[in-house]
Image (cartoon, coloured by chain):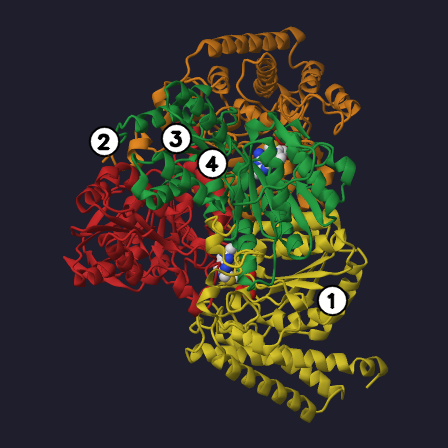
Chain colours: A yellow, B red, C green, D orange
C-alpha cells in the first residue's frame, strides 16, 4: 500500500461503511414495505451509493445538501442515524421530522441536510439560496444540490443556475443521471446534452462515473474546495443506476428496462462490490474487517428497525403544531383567538 | 345496459371514446404512454392510438401546460395529465394567466379547448406534497370550469363533456377511488356541467359533498338514519359552474346544511357554498350552515396524524346531528 | 410625532429600518436596486445598503422565490419583491409546496422566515394579467400568513411585523394607493397580526373591507350616514390570521354585514368571512350577509368595462341600504 | 440593379412599408399617451422593426406568431390593420379584441397572430403548442415565437425547447436581444451565452444583426422553409435596440442607459433609415417613391387614430361575455342558472 493510500485508510473505510449503511438501510426499508409494515411508498437509493458518499465525504457538517424523493442515501451520507430515520419512515414521533415528513421529506438540519423533496427539481432554488446565505454572510460553507436526470426538465433549474453563475455562489449542482425518470428512459425526455445546458450559463461542468466512489470523491474534494474559495458554481453529471424500480412497488418493470441491463449494472457496476474489491486488492482492508463492518451495520439497522416498530406515534395534539414557528397550535392562531 | 367498472376504467373509456370520435383530441403528460400513468389509469391507450397521440413528456409541467394551450388555440383538443394535484401550483401561471383568460382577452376570437386531468385526496401516506386537494384555487379563477367526479359514472360522463367543451376545464379525480367499481352504462352518455345530483332525498338536513366527500356524506346519512334524522345528499359534480338552485331548493326544504369538501377549510370550497346558502336561503335556515374541510395544516405523513385531517362519516354525522338537535354549534 | 407620508414611503421606511436593525435581512426582486421598482417604492435603498443586500434578479420568479426560501432556511431573512401580484401564479409551487410546508414537514426544525411583497388592484388599465387580486389563493394554503395593508400606517406596521415573523408572510399592497399620504408616527412601531381595526363605529350594519376596499367601505359609510344608516367599518388587516372575534362582535351588535374585497367573488375571500359570520353570528343576523368582490371575469382592459368589475362606495352603500331596509336582497 | 434584386422589388418595398408602418404606428401611440388620450401604458417597438418585418415577411397568413408586451411590431408585420389596432389601444369595441385585451394582449388570429402576452416568457409554450398542432395535423405551418432577452430567464423556455427538440417541432424561437429588460442591462441578468443555451438542447441556432432587415429576412426564409420541411426547431438571437424607454412613461432613463448609447443606435443603426439608404443606393426606389410610402402610412395612421378616438366603447353588457366560448353571459352560467 503506497503512502497516500495509507494516509487515507480511515477515509476509505468510512466511505465503505457509509455505502454499506445506505445499502443495508434500503434493504430494510424495502422489507418493511414488502411486509406491509411501512406506510406509503419509498424510492430506493441502492446502486447510487457512490454518489452520495463520494460527495458528502468532501463536505463538513456545516455544509448543506438538498435532496430528492430518492433521499435516504443523501441523508445517511450526510451523517444521519438509523434510528431517527426508521422512526421517520414509520411516522413515529422520534423520527427526524416527528413523523410529519416521511421518506420523501426527511431532513436532518443538524447535519446540514435541508431535506428531501417530493417536487422534482423543487430543491434547486433552496440549494442556491443556502449558497446565497453563505456568500452574503461570509460563512465559507458550500451547498450541494442533488437531483436526478429527470429534474433537468424543470425550468427552475435553469433560472437558478443563471443566478448562481451571475452571483458566483458556492453551490454544486450534482445531477445523478441514473438513466430513467420513473418509467421513461432519459434519452426520451432529454434533448441535446445535459452538461452543455449547465455550461451555457458559464458554469464549469464535469461528468464522472457515479459508480466509482473514489473518482466521485476526488472531483468533489476539488470542487468543494474551489467553491469554498469563491470559484463556484459548478455542475457535475454523475452516471449511475438505480438497482430497484422507481419505487418499492415498481416490481414488474421489464417493459421499460430490460432485465439484462439491470443485471449487468448489478454485477459489473455495483459501487460497493467494486470498492470492496479495490480495498482488498490494494490491501487496505481484509475480508474479515469488511465483513465486520457489514455485520455491524446490519445489527445497527436491525436494532433501529426494531426500535422504530415499537416507538410511539406522535400525539394527536401535534397535528396543528409546527405549522408556524413561534405558534404552538396553529388552528386557534389563524382564527385570531391566540392573541 | 349497465356494467360495473372501476373509476379508473371509466376515465380510460371516456378518453378512448373521445379520441376515436375526434382526431384532434390527444393526450399528454408524464408517463402516460407505455406506463399508462403511475395509477395505470391510461393503460392501453398508447397501444390503440400510438405515440403520436399519446405523448410522454419530460417532467416539465409549466412547459407542457403551455404547449397544450398553444395546441388548443390552433385546432387541437389536448387532454393533459397532471400526475398529482399538488403539481397544480407549477402550472398555475399557464393555466390561470393564459388558458383562463385567452378567450376573454381576445374578445372571443381565440378558444382554448383543453382538459386538465389531475387528482386530489389525502390518507395515502404520501406526505404534504402529494396529498393536497387544490380545486378551490382554480375555482377562484374566471375562465376555468371545474369538475369533481365522485363515481365511475360521473368520471366518465363529466370527462366526455369536458373534452367537448370549448374552454379549459380542470377535472380532479379522487386518487383513492380509482379502483372502486360502480355502474356505468355501455352506451354513450355525457353529464352536463352545472347540474347537481341528488343522491339521496331527505327532510331534516342537506349534506352537500364534493368528490371524495360524496361517499362520506352518503355514509353519514346512513349513520343519521339510525338516529331518525333524514339527510338529503347532494353532489354538485361541477363547482364552476355551480348548480346553486338545486342546493338552495334542498336547503329551503330541510332548513339545515352541512357542506363537506376535502380541500382545506380556510378560504376553501365550503366557504363559497356555505356563504351562498346562508345568503340566499337565509330566511329558511333553522341552524347555521356548517363547513367541514381538510384541517388547515399541511398534510402530515404519519398515519396517526393524517387521518385526523380529513372529514369522516362520523364527523359529518356528528355535525349534522348537532344542528338538527338545535345545538348552537358555535354558541352565542 | 406623526407625519404624513405616502404609502410607498411607509413601505420604504419599514424595509430600511428592518435592514438597519438586522443584517440578515435583504431584498431581492426585479429592478429593485437602481430602478427602485417600477413603482419607485424601493428608491434609495440600494444607495444605503448596496447591491450586496439589494439584489436585482433576472426575470425568474420561480427561481428567485426558491432562492429566497433556501436563504431563509439557512439564516437570512429575505424580503422578496414580486413586481405584480399576477405573477404569484409563477411562484405558487415554491411558495406553497416549499415555503409553506417546510416548517411542518421538518417537524419544526427548519424555519422559513421570508416576506413576499406584492400587490393587487385593478382599474389601472393594465389588462387581465396585471390587475388581479390573488390573495385568496395564498390564504387557502396552511403555513402562509397574509397581510393586506390599507393605509400608509398599516403598510409600515404590518411589514415590520412580517419581517420579524419567523414564517413566510405574503403582503399585498394596493398599487393605486402608493402615492396616497397618511399619518405615520416617527418612531418605531409594529402592528400585530390577527388584530382587526375598527375604523369607524356604527350601529346598523358592519362593513368588512380589505385592502383597497377599506377606503371604499369608509366612503360607503359616509354615503350611508346621509341616509341615517350608521355603519361600522372593520379592516381585518391580516386575513391569515383572521381576527374573527372583532368581526363577530361587531355583527352581533349591528345584526347585518357586507363583506367587500377586491379579489374575485367566486371562491374568494368574502366567502370565507361571510360564511364565518353566517355560521358564528347566526342567531344575531337580521339579514343575509352580503358579499361584494371583483366581478368573476378576467379584468378587461377597456375603461368602459374595467370600472364595472370592482365594488364602489355606491355599490357597497346600496347593498347595505337594502339589507338595512329589510329588502330580501335575494328574495325567497 | 441586378436581376435578383429586380425580382424582389415588390418584397423590398413591402418590407420598407411595413417597417414604416410600425414606426408611424408607434409615434402615434406615443402621442396618444403623451396627450393623455390613451388608457394605461404601452411598450414601443420602434428601433426593432427589422426583426418583426424581416421574419414575418418569410411567413404566410397561415403561419403563426406569438408576441410579447412589446407587441405592436409583430402585430403589424403579421398583417394587422391600424384601425382595429388603435381601437384596441383605446379600449373600443371595434378593436381586435373588442377593447378587452389592450396593447399588451393584442391578438389578430385571422392573420395568425396568437397574441401579445404580458407575462414575460408566457408565450413560449403557446408557440410550441401551435407547432405541435401543425405537426400532428400535418398542416405544414410554422410558428415563430418572439421574445426578449429578458425572457431567457424564464424557466419555461428551457422546458419547451427541450420538447420542441425531442419532437422536432416546426417552431422558431426568435430572441430579440435589445440589451435591456426594463431598467437592467442584459449583461447583468444573463450569465454565459444565450445562444449556447438553445444549442445545448441540440437546437440549431443563429445570431443575426437585428437592424438589418435583409439579413434577418434571408435567415428567416431559410429557416422557415426548413422548419416547414421538418428540420426544426431553430433558435435565432437578433441583436437589436429599443429606441424608446421600457414603456412610454419611461422618460428619465439616463441612470440605466446612456444618452450617447441611445443616439449612436438611433443615428448609426436605425433599421429603417439604413434600409432606405440601401434602397436608394441600389436604385430600387427613388426618394419620392419612398416619401410617398411614408406619407400614405402617416395618413392611414392619422385616419385610424381619428376613427378610433370617435369609435364607441363596448356595451356594458359585454363585461361578462367571452369568458367562455359557447356561453353568452358567464355570470348566470357559473351560478348554474343558464341551464
Ligand atoms: C414536479 C414533479 N413532477 C412529477 C413528479 C413525479 N415524479 C416523482 S419522481 C419522478 C422521476 C424523477 O426522475 P429523476 O429526477 O431522474 O430522479 P430518479 O427518480 O431517477 O432518482 C417523477 C416524474 C414529481 N414528484 N414532481
Ligand atoms: C413574468 C413576468 N415578470 C415580470 C414582468 C415585468 N416586465 C415586463 S417587461 C419586462 C422586461 C422584459 O424584458 P425583455 O424580455 O428583454 O423584453 P423587452 O422589454 O426588452 O422587449 C419585465 C420584467 C412581466 N411582465 N412578466
Ligand atoms: Mg433519474
Ligand atoms: Mg430586452
Alpha carbon separation for disc pair 1 and 4 = 48 Å
**SS under mark 4:** loop
Given the image, what chain letter belongs to the residue carrying mark 1? Answer: A
State the residue in front, A24 or B243: B243
**Contact check, label 1 and label 3, Cβ < 8 Å:** no
Given the image, what chain letter belongs to the residue carrying mark 2? Answer: C
Work out whether disc 3 and disc 4 sit on a shared chain: no
Work out whether disc 1 and disc 4 sit on a shared chain: no
Q: Label 3: how many residues lie within 10 Å, few (<14), some (14-19) or many (20+)? A: some
- Image quarter in which the N terminus of chain D is found: top right
Alpha carbon separation for disc pair 2 and 3 = 25 Å
Q: Is residue D199 left or right of residue B194?
A: right
Of tags 1 and 3, the one toward the viewer is: 3
Q: Which residue position holds label 3?
A: C203
Alpha carbon separation for disc pair 1 and 2 = 73 Å
State the residue in front, A328 or D334: A328
Residue B159 vertical placement versus D81 (above, below): below
**Contact check, label 2 and label 3, Cβ < 8 Å:** no
Q: Which residue position holds label 2?
A: C331
- Label 2 CB-ligand 2 distance < 8 A: no
Of tags 1 and 2, the one toward the viewer is: 2
Disc sitting over residue A220 in the figure = 1
State the residue in front, D283 or A145: A145
How far from the left and from the top, in percent, is residue A178? Answer: 58, 67
How far from the left and from the top, in percent, is residue D143? Answer: 51, 36
Q: Which residue position holds label 4?
A: D141
**Contact check, label 3 and label 4, Cβ < 8 Å:** no
Amino acid at each position: 500500500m503506497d503512502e497516500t493510500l495509507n494516509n487515507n485508510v480511515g477515509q476509505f473505510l468510512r466511505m465503505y461503511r457509509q455505502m454499506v449503511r445506505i445499502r443495508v438501510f434500503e434493504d430494510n426499508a424495502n422489507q418493511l414495505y414488502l411486509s406491509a409494515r411501512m406506510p406509503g411508498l419509498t424510492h430506493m437509493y441502492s446502486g447510487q451509493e457512490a454518489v452520495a458518499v463520494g460527495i458528502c465525504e468532501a463536505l463538513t457538517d456545516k455544509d448543506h445538501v438538498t435532496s430528492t424523493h430518492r433521499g435516504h442515501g443523501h441523508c445517511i451520507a450526510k451523517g444521519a442515524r438509523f434510528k431517527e430515520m426508521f422512526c421517520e419512515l414509520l411516522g413515529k414521533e422520534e423520527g427526524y421530522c416527528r413523523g410529519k415528513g416521511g421518506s420523501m421529506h426527511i431532513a436532518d438540519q443538524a447535519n446540514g441536510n435541508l431535506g428531501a423533496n417530493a417536487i422534482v427539481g423543487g430543491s434547486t432554488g433552496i440549494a442556491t439560496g443556502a449558497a446565497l446565505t453563505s456568500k452574503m454572510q461570509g460563512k465559507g460553507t458550500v451547498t450541494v444540490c442533488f437531483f436526478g436526470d429527470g429534474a433537468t426538465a424543470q425550468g427552475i433549474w435553469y433560472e437558478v443556475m443563471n443566478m448562481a453563475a451571475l452571483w458566483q455562489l458556492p453551490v454544486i449542482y450534482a445531477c445523478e443521471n441514473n438513466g430513467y425518470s420513473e418509467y421513461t428512459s432519459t434519452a426520451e425526455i432529454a434533448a441535446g446534452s445535459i452538461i452543455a445546458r449547465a455550461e451555457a450559463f458559464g458554469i464549469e461542468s464535469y461528468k464522472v462515473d457515479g459508480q466509482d466512489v473514489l473518482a466521485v470523491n476526488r472531483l468533489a474534494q476539488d470542487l468543494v474546495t474551489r467553491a469554498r474559495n469563491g470559484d463556484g458554481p459548478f455542475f457535475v453529471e454523475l452516471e449511475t443506476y438505480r438497482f430497484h424500480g422507481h419505487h418499492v412497488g415498481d416490481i414488474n418493470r421489464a417493459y421499460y428496462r430490460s432485465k439484462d441491463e439491470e443485471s449487468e449494472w448489478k454485477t459489473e457496476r455495483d459501487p460497493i462490490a467494486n470498492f470492496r474489491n479495490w480495498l482488498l486488492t490494494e490491501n487496505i482492508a481484509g475480508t474479515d474487517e469488511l465483513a465486520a463492518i457489514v455485520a455491524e451495520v446490519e445489527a445497527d439497522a436491525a436494532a433501529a428497525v426494531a426500535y422504530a416498530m415499537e416507538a410511539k406515534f406522535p400525539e394527536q395534539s401535534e397535528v396543528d403544531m409546527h405549522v408556524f414557528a413561534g405558534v404552538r397550535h396553529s388552528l386557534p392562531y389563524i382564527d385570531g383567538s391566540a392573541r | 345496459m349497465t356494467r360495473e367498472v372501476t373509476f379508473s376504467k371509466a376515465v380510460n373509456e371516456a378518453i378512448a371514446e373521445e379520441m376515436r370520435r375526434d382526431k384532434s383530441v390527444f393526450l399528454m403528460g408524464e408517463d402516460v404512454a407505455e406506463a399508462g400513468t403511475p395509477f395505470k389509469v391510461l393503460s392501453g391507450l398508447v397501444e390503440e392510438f400510438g405515440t403520436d397521440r399519446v405523448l410522454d413528456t419530460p417532467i416539465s409541467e409549466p412547459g407542457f401546460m403551455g404547449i397544450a394551450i398553444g395546441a388548443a388555440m390552433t385546432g387541437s383538443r389536448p387532454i393533459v395529465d397532471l400526475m398529482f394535484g399538488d403539481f397544480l401550483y407549477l402550472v398555475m401561471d399557464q393555466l390561470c394567466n393564459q388558458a383562463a383568460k385567452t378567450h376573454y382577452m381576445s374578445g372571443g376570437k381565440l378558444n382554448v379547448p383543453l382538459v386538465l386531468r389531475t387528482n386530489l385526496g389525502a390518507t395515502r401516506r404520501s406526505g404534504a406534497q402529494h396529498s393536497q386537494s387544490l380545486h378551490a384555487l382554480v375555482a377562484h379563477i374566471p375562465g376555468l370550469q371545474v369538475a369533481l367526479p365522485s363515481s365511475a359514472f360521473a368520471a366518465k360522463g363529466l370527462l366526455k363533456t369536458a373534452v367537448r367543451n370549448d374552454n379549459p376545464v380542470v377535472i380532479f379525480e379522487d386518487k383513492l377511488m380509482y379502483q372502486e367499481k360502480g355502474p356505468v352504462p355501455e352506451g354513450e352518455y355525457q353529464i352536463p356541467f352545472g347540474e347537481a345530483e341528488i343522491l339521496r332525498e331527505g327532510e331534516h338536513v342537506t349534506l352537500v359533498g364534493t368528490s371524495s366527500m360524496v361517499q362520506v356524506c352518503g355514509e353519514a346519512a346512513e349513520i343519521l338514519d339510525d338516529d331518525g334524522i333524514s339527510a338529503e345528499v347532494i353532489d354538485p359534480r361541477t363547482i364552476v359552474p355551480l348548480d346553486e338552485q338545486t342546493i338552495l331548493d334542498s336547503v329551503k326544504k330541510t332548513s339545515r346544511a352541512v357542506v363537506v369538501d376535502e380541500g382545506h377549510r380556510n378560504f376553501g370550497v365550503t366557504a363559497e357554498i356555505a356563504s351562498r346558502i346562508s345568503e340566499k336561503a337565509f330566511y329558511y335556515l333553522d341552524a347555521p350552515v356548517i363547513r367541514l374541510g381538510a384541517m388547515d395544516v399541511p398534510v402530515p405523513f404519519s398515519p396517526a396524524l393524517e387521518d385526523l385531517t380529513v372529514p369522516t362519516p362520523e364527523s359529518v354525522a356528528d355535525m349534522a346531528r348537532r344542528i338538527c338537535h338545535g345545538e348552537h354549534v358555535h354558541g352565542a
